Image (cartoon, rainbow, N blue to C red):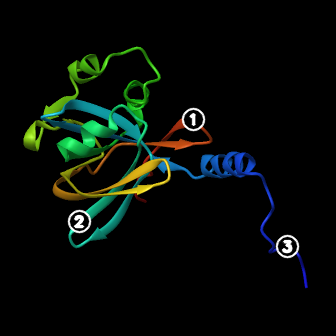
């Protein structure tokens, strides 16, 4: 019998590095998740977003519990998942904390509309899904936020922004033949 299916015996730190490297090869849409409420207004760039079910329309968003914004999202509960078009790489960098732009300045950019419960909605998002966190589940270092979408807006045009191999990439929409 072959040993090719035997799990590798690696140290926890090595396994963690190997897992991160594997995840770098998992291309994902880039999103800015926003919230507003009694605990304030903030947003984060996230690629760990996934559909769960369409009845009721529910997504999951993973957020590191050590993030300063975690408590704001957890207390506010109202959120918007903004799927970024290709030309918003700089905005993604701002909300990922890769620039020196303050949170207040990020929301002062002329790209935001006010959605339900005053939650910021990106005006030209490929899709914006406004909703409420209906459940949080702690898994390791992160919280998995289950968001039930209450208002959905979708565009029929525009390129996509994805994160792959630790970089942002613009993916053009192919024209129908």
68 vs 14: above or below: above
The answer to which of marks 3 and 1 sits earlier in the sequence is 3
Q: Nearer the viewer, residue 70 or 58?
A: 70
The answer to which of marks 2 and 3 sits earlier in the sequence is 3
Crowding at mark 1 (Cα within 10 Å: few <14, some 14-19, many 20+) = few
Q: Circle 2 sits in a helix, a strand or a loop, which is it?
A: strand
Quadrant of the frame with the C terminus? bottom left
Tag 2 residue: 57
Tag 3 residue: 4
Q: Circle 3 sits in a helix, a strand or a loop, which is it?
A: loop
Taking the spot 75% from the left edge, 47% from the top edge, the residue there is 14
Taking the spot 26% from the left edge, 41% from the top edge, the residue there is 73
Crowding at mark 2 (Cα within 10 Å: few <14, some 14-19, many 20+) = some
Q: Outermost residue toward the right? A: 1
Tag 1 residue: 167
Residue 159 x %, y %: 40, 42
Taking the spot 27% from the left edge, 63% from the top edge, the residue there is 58
Taking the spot 19% from the left edge, 30% from the top edge, the residue there is 112
- 168 on left or right of 138: right
The answer to whether mark 1 and mark 2 are in CB contact below 8 A is no
Q: CA distance from mark 1 to mark 2?
A: 30 Å
Q: Nearer the viewer, residue 39 or 109?
A: 39
Q: CA distance from mark 3 to mark 1?
A: 32 Å
Residue 30 x %, y %: 42, 42
Crowding at mark 3 (Cα within 10 Å: few <14, some 14-19, many 20+) = few
Q: Nearer the viewer, residue 41 or 24?
A: 41
Quadrant of the frame with the N terminus? bottom right
83 vs 52: above or below: above
164 vs 52: above or below: above
């Amino acid at each position: 019998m072959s040993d090719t299916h035997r799990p590798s015996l690696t140290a926890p730190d090595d396994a963690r590095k190997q897992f991160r490297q594997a995840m770098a090869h998992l291309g994902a849409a880039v999103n800015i998740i926003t919230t507003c409420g009694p605990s304030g207004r903030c947003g984060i760039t996230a690629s760990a977003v996934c559909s769960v079910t369409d009845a009721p329309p529910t997504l999951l968003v993973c957020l590191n519990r050590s993030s300063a914004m975690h408590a704001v999202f957890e207390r506010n509960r109202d959120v918007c998942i903004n799927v970024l078009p290709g030309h918003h790489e700089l905005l993604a960098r701002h909300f990922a904390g890769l620039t020196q732009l303050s949170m207040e300045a990020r929301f002062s950019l002329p790209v935001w509309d006010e959605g339900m419960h005053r939650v910021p909605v990106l005006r030209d998002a490929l899709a914006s899904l406004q909703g409420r966190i209906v459940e949080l589940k702690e898994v390791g270092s992160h919280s998995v936020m289950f968001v039930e979408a209450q208002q959905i807006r979708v565009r029929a045009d525009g390129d996509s922004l994805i994160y792959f191999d630790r970089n942002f990439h613009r993916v053009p929409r192919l024209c129908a033949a």
